[in-house]
Amino acid sequence: MEDLSIYNPESSDLRKAQLKMLDILIEVAKICDQNNIPYWLSFGTLLGAVRHKGFIPWDDDLDIEVERKNYKKLLTLLERELPPSMTLQYEGNEKHYCFRYAKVRDRKSFIQEKSSIDFKEKGIFIDIFYREYSTIFLKKIADRLLGGAVLYSKLSTFKDKREKNYQRLINSLRIFLSECFIFLARGISMTLPFNKLFLALEIGQTGASGGIDKRYVFPLNEIYFEGFKFKSPHNPDAYLRQIYGDYMKIPSPENRIVHATKIEFYNN
């Protein structure tokens, strides 16, 4: 049996980072529970809870999800109730933030990833995704239009002014049309019983591009993660199989993804 603890032995930077993420999760979960906001562990975090009873040994991120209808409320609460040692990062409070999900970051650490973007806040973090009801057809059109438009519109540095303005116009149009299709799907979902929950942007996400069946998510269950009990999808096995297939199989070493290239901790 392979000893996977070699990836995150006690006192290693990775293990300390994982425990820092756990601290953030505990705080966010407490705020959710106190304000009746359903959340659940997702992606590799849920996989780790099922397969390892905690973090996947080489994992250096942590993911939770909420429904879109609770997402903005949660952001407002986090901005108000997070302790001073943590901060919320999302599209609305940082100019160059380009993701359709939020991060809660630790303010006494630093993490650099392979595809790192020069954000203002750079501490160890957890991701908060939101899902909403839609149809595969409308969602695929919206995602195809959106693609990297948000990223390009916020980060592009074209030297030629006309090229820059043209690209921004095209990206803005793509974002607008994408939002129109999403708005249409939201309107239809109010009258038709959709049963698939989609991420804000499915492109580039791991598996389940066809959405997650709501029966796998609700009513929520509970699961132990690193010795603490957190909310989980109703059927973790079906949820994980839809995303990863045979998730209980340990991947080969070359497929064990580590995102961080540098981790630092600050005392003050």
Image (cartoon, rainbow, N blue to C red):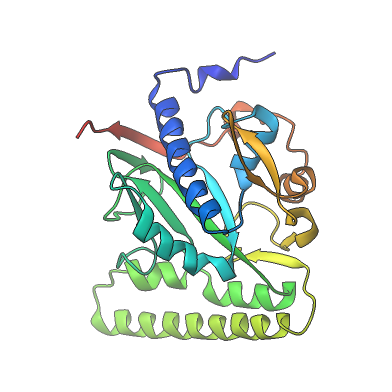
Where 101 sits versus 165, above or below? above
Task: For residue 123, say whether it is visible.
Answer: yes
Residue 87: x and y in percent read 33, 52
Q: Give the residue displayed 73% in from the left and 72% down from the top.
A: 136
Relative placement, left or right, of 116 versus 223 is: left
Can you say which quadrant of the picture contains the C terminus?
top left
Residue 252: x and y in percent read 65, 28
Relative placement, left or right, of 189 versus 146 is: right
Task: Compare residues 209 and 33 and report the one nearer the observer.
Answer: 33
Q: Give the residue displayed 69% in from the left and 78% down from the top.
A: 138
Can you say which quadrant of the picture contains the N terminus?
top right
Residue 139: x and y in percent read 66, 74
Residue 267: x and y in percent read 22, 31
- Toward the front, the furthest residue is 34
Task: For residue 203, say whether it is visible.
Answer: no
Residue 76 found in image quarter: bottom left
